[in-house]
Amino acid sequence: MNKGEEQTNQDSKWQDRIWVLSVAGQAGLFIAFPVILGFAVGLLLDRQFNTVILFSVLLAMAGFGGGVYLVYRWVQTTVKKHLADRQKED
């Protein structure tokens, strides 16, 4: 392996690491936003119906479940696309 191939290989490894970090960050946001939205709507419903934190907890948990489902679907399609792109490069 010559020096140019080694440099290209290292650049590829760094690109993969950065890609994984960006996917992880986006996945975290995909989970956080539905939880926060569910909690906020739950607070409004709790105030409207004069309940303690019933709706807040329920909707936050539903938001977490929905966020996990969104991440699962999104990661599946993103990883498939990334692997297909990598195979085209090779």
Image (tube, rainbow, N blue to C red):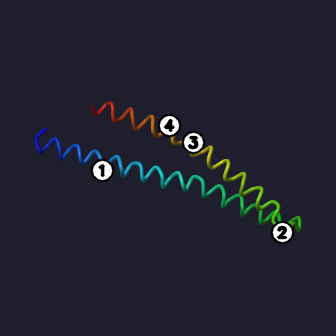
Badge 2, how many Cα within 10 Å: few under 14, some, many 20+?
A: few
Q: CA distance from mark 4 to mark 1?
A: 22 Å
Give the labeled residue for mark 3.
72
How far is disc 4 from disc 2 in space, using C-alphas?
Answer: 40 Å
- SS at mark 2? helix
Between disc 3 and disc 4, whose residue precedes? 3
Q: Which residue is mark 4?
A: 77
Give the position of the N terminus as an image quadrant: top left
Label 1–label 2 contact, CB within 8 A: no
Farthest left residue in view: 2
Task: Check residue 14 in the rendering and tell me which mark sits there, or answer none.
Answer: 1
Instruction: Tell me: 2 left or right of 36.
Output: left
Which of the marked residues, 4 or 2, is nearer the chain's N terminus?
2
User: Is residue 77 rendered to the left or right of residue 59?
Assistant: left
Indicate which disc residue 47 carries. Answer: 2
Amino acid at the residue labelled 3: Tyr
Q: Is residue 88 above or below residue 23?
A: above
- Within 10 Å of disc 1 (Cα), the crowding (few <14, some 14-19, many 20+) is few
Q: So how many labels did they put on this image? A: 4
How crowded pointer 3 is (Cα within 10 Å; few <14, some 14-19, many 20+) is rated as: few
User: Is 7 located above or below residue 90 in the figure?
Assistant: below
What is the three-letter code of the residue carrying label 2? Arg
**Contact flag, marks 3 and 1 (Cβ < 8 Å):** no
Q: Earlier in the sequence, mark 4 or mark 1?
A: 1
Name which of mark 1 and mark 2 comes first in the sequence. Answer: 1
